Amino acid sequence: MRTIILATAMLLSGTVNAQTAAGSHNPALKDGSPHPTAAAAAGRNSFTQDQAKGRLAKAGYTGVGKLVKDKDGVWRGTAMKDGAKANVGVDYKGDVVVH
């Protein structure tokens, strides 16, 4: 009986280790604020235009113009920051990109 319990425990611990060793391909966000990034991540974007504008505002942009979602799911448009006009984008992660 003890051998069966020990073997079962070893089997279960190996399964748990295999799952955690692989890691998650989509880890939870630790911080919900927008992050500047060099390149927008392509993916299915669930943000509305107003939500994307809100992400840009949180990142310090003002005067955000009309945003258009491109073929990669990135909201793109223009905005102002520090007195300069910039071409900006918001990807499906909510990260802000300047291009």
Image (cartoon, helix red, strand yellow):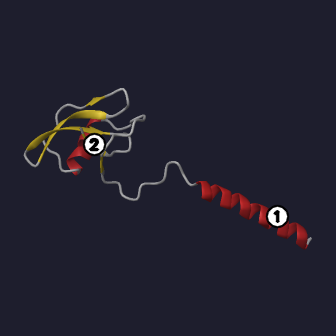
Quadrant that contains the C terminus: top left
Given the image, on which type of amino acid does mark 2 rest? Val
Q: Position of residue 44 (x, y in %)?
A: 42, 34
Q: Looking at the rendered structure, which numbered label has been put on residue 90? A: none
Is 42 rendered above or below residue 95? above
x 67%, y 57%: residue:
18
Quadrant that contains the N terminus: bottom right
Q: Are marks 1 and 2 in contact (CB under 8 Å)?
A: no
Q: Position of residue 89 (x, y in %)?
A: 27, 38
Is 80 rendered above or below residue 69? below
Q: Secondary structure at mark 1?
A: helix
Q: Looking at the rendered structure, which numbered label has been put on residue 97? A: 2
Given the image, on which type of amino acid does mark 1 rest? Thr
x 9%, y 43%: residue:
84
Instruction: Determine whether, in the image, residue 41 is placed left or right of residue 24.
Output: left
Q: Quadrant for residue 22, please give it.
A: bottom right
Q: Position of residue 49 (x, y in %)?
A: 28, 35
Label 1 crowd bin: few (<14), some (14–19), many (20+), radius 10 Å: few
Q: Secondary structure at mark 2?
A: strand
Sequence-wise, the earlier of marks 1 and 2 is 1
Label 2 crowd bin: few (<14), some (14–19), many (20+), radius 10 Å: many
Is 60 rendered above or below residue 3? above
* Residue, disc 1: 8
x 52%, y 48%: residue:
25
Instruction: Determine whether, in the image, residue 56 is placed left or right of residue 7.
Output: left
Measure the C-alpha gap from mark 1 to mark 2: 50 Å
x 23%, y 51%: residue:
58
Q: Position of residue 96 (x, y in %)?
A: 28, 45
Instruction: Determine whether, in the image, residue 44 is placed left or right of residue 21.
Output: left
Q: Quadrant for residue 43, please give it.
A: top left
Q: How many marks?
A: 2
